[in-house]
Image (cartoon, rainbow, N blue to C red):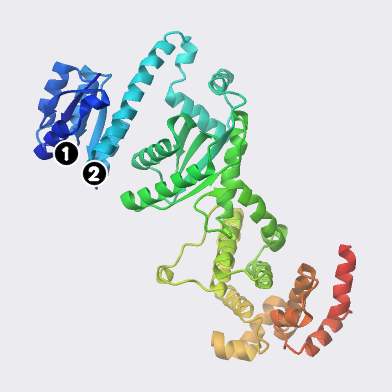
């Protein structure tokens, strides 16, 4: 039997656990109880218990100090921490002292029994590990858990490995073992408490044998798992989300790779990073899987011209590409949520993982599509501005430049409206002098406003016909901002392209065949 000591300053809790839990049925001999850390330390020195279950906040000597002092006299004793809501700082200190088991107050027999069984198992495994380590070479002994974690981290980052370390790491794993990477990402940096919670939930729901390795850095925690039932992993993710929200008010994303071999760890991790870049496009899934990535990426490839958007050099070019994407999503019948996810994903891909911060005033309401398009365009233009600033060593800010940007934003916001004109924009939208508007626009664009709008609309209509050759000509005209009757659109289209819209569609269809 294993000897257990209970240390708790609350008499009702302490004596209740001592008297009403049938310890012998769990293979435990109760060595006694203590009401504070000083008395607890004395009994630890006297009885040398295998397990100590201790409260954290106690008079005279708290649980943290008890653990520190007891480790010096009984280094093999395993501690179980009893903690209450809000005692995260104490729990973190306990983890730094090597404590890996905790029970949240108020305690119940079932939870205590579960933790006791895990502690007993860890003691047995530690005993077996000691025997095993006695036969290892000095090089093998260097691969302690922290060293393994470091090698695992280096593999994820694609760093060069010391060959002996890498070889020993791989020898610990079956080369034919099917593994996968589960990556959990938080908004903020991951601390000890979060690591502790995530590890325990995953171990509890999947089983310790399937949790091979883990490491944490910045705002991510990465697990190497023996491939498991996806339903169990999904259940673990949902539990993680619930616990993080309840205990620390944190939100998280989770992504899982396909199955692979230990030699493919870096590739599998890359899959989860791609999923985060996708930003959950088109799903409300709690767990992003790489199967989803393949499906969604094919759909997004049809929406986004990566070369054109990535090579855009100013706000106008970005607006043109985003407006075309907006029209494509409208043709495909995307919901507002799905559109929002597409814009967020574009921000992540072309913004080096960053997204537009959500405005406080919009926290309680849904953002309209134009606002999403506009914010994405300004965000990506800001990325270009930063690159130019780095190259030029200075930032150019001119009032007229800012006014021209406002004009361009207003043009694209109202592009689908047939009444769009200088007078409409200056009187109803920008509240700007009409003559000044005309002079400013001509100076910057070297073309009159009316001609510019016609060119923009015809280019958009051509892109929509190329995207969906079976689109109704009237629909393409309407999206481009022409009257719905189509007569004026056909006349302008033929004058500017040399073909009627129907002839252009036949031309595009013939090219695709």
Is residue 46 positioned above or below 244 on the image? above
Q: Which residue is mark 2?
A: 87
Q: Judge left or right: residue 1 versus residue 433.
A: left
User: Can residue 197 be seen at all in this image of the molecule?
Assistant: yes
Task: State the residue position of label 1.
Answer: 57
Neighbours of disc 2 within 10 Å: few (<14), some (14-19), many (20+): few
Residue 134, given in percent of the width and then of the height, sits at 42, 9
Hey, which quadrant is residue 161 in on the image? Answer: top right
Viewed as shown, does residue 348 lie left or right of 80? right
Tag 1 secondary structure: loop
Q: Callout 1: few (<14), some (14-19), or many (20+) C-alpha neighbours within 10 Å?
A: some
User: Relative to residue 382, is residue 136 depicted above or below?
Assistant: above
The vertical placement of 341 against 228, above or below, is below
Q: Quadrant of residue 97?
A: top left
Q: Residue at x 10, y 26 (%)?
A: 39
In front of the other: 342 or 159: 342
Q: Position of residue 451 (x, y in %)?
A: 75, 83
Kindly state the secondary structure of the residue where label 2 is placed: loop
Q: How many callouts does the rendering have?
A: 2
- The one of 393 and 508 positioned closer to us in this rendering: 508
Of the two numbered discs 1 and 2 on the same chain, state the one appearing first in sequence: 1
> How far separated are the C-alphas under marks 1 and 2?
9 Å
Q: Residue at x 26, y 19 (%)?
A: 75
Q: Are marks 1 and 2 in contact (CB under 8 Å)?
A: yes
**Residue 131 image point, x, y percent:** 40, 11
């Amino acid at each position: 039997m294993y000897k257990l000591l209970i240390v708790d300053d609350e008499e009702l809790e302490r004596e209740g656990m001592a008297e009403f839990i049938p310890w012998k049925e769990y293979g435990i001999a109760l060595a006694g109880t203590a009401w504070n850390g000083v008395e607890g330390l004395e009994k630890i020195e006297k009885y040398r218990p295998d397990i100590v279950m201790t409260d954290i906040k106690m008079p005279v000597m708290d649980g943290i100090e008890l653990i520190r002092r007891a480790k010096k006299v009984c280094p093999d004793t395993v501690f179980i921490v009893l903690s209450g809501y809000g005692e995260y700082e104490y729990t973190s200190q306990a983890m730094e002292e090597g404590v890996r088991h905790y029970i949240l107050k108020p305690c119940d027999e079932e939870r205590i029994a579960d933790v006791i069984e895990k502690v007993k198992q860890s003691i047995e495994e530690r005993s077996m590990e000691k025997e095993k380590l006695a036969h290892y070479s000095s090089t093998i002994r260097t691969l302690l858990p922290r060293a393994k974690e470091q090698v695992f981290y280096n593999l994820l980052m694609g760093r060069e490995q010391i060959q002996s370390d890498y070889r020993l790491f791989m020898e610990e794993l079956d080369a034919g073992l099917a593994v996968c990477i589960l990556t959990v990402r938080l908004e903020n940096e991951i601390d000890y408490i979060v690591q502790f919670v995530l590890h325990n939930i995953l171990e509890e729901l999947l089983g310790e044998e399937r949790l091979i390795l883990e490491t944490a850095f910045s705002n991510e925690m990465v697990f190497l798992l023996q491939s498991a039932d996806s339903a169990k992993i999904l259940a673990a993710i949902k539990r993680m989300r619930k616990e993080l929200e309840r205990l620390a008010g944190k939100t998280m994303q989770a992504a899982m790779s396909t199955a692979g071999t230990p030699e493919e760890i870096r590739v599998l991790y890359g899959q989860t990073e791609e999923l985060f870049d996708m930003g959950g496009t088109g799903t409300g899934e709690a767990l992003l899987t790489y199967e989803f990535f393949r499906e969604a990426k094919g759909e997004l490839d049809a929406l986004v011209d990566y070369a054109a958007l990535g090579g855009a050099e100013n706000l106008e070019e970005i607006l043109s590409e985003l407006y075309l994407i907006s029209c494509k999503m409208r043709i495909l019948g995307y919901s507002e949520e799905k559109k929002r996810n597409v814009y967020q994903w574009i921000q992540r891909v072309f913004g080096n993982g960053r997204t537009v911060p959500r405005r406080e005033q919009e926290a309680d309401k849904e953002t309209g599509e134009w606002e999403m398009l506009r914010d994405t365009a300004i965000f990506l233009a800001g990325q270009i501005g930063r690159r130019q600033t780095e190259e030029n060593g200075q930032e150019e800010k001119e009032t007229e430049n800012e006014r021209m940007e406002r004009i361009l934003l207003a043009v694209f916001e109202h592009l689908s409206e047939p009444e769009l004109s200088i007078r409409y924009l200056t009187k109803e939208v920008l509240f700007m002098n009409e003559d000044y508007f005309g002079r400013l626009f001509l100076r910057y664009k070297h073309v009159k406003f009316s001609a510019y709008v016609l060119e923009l609309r015809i280019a958009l209509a051509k892109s929509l016909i190329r995207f969906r050759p079976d689109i109704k000509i009237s629909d393409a005209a309407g999206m481009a901002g022409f009257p719905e009757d189509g007569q004026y659109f056909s006349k302008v289209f033929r004058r500017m392209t040399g073909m009627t819209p129907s002839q252009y569609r036949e031309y595009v269809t013939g090219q695709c065949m």
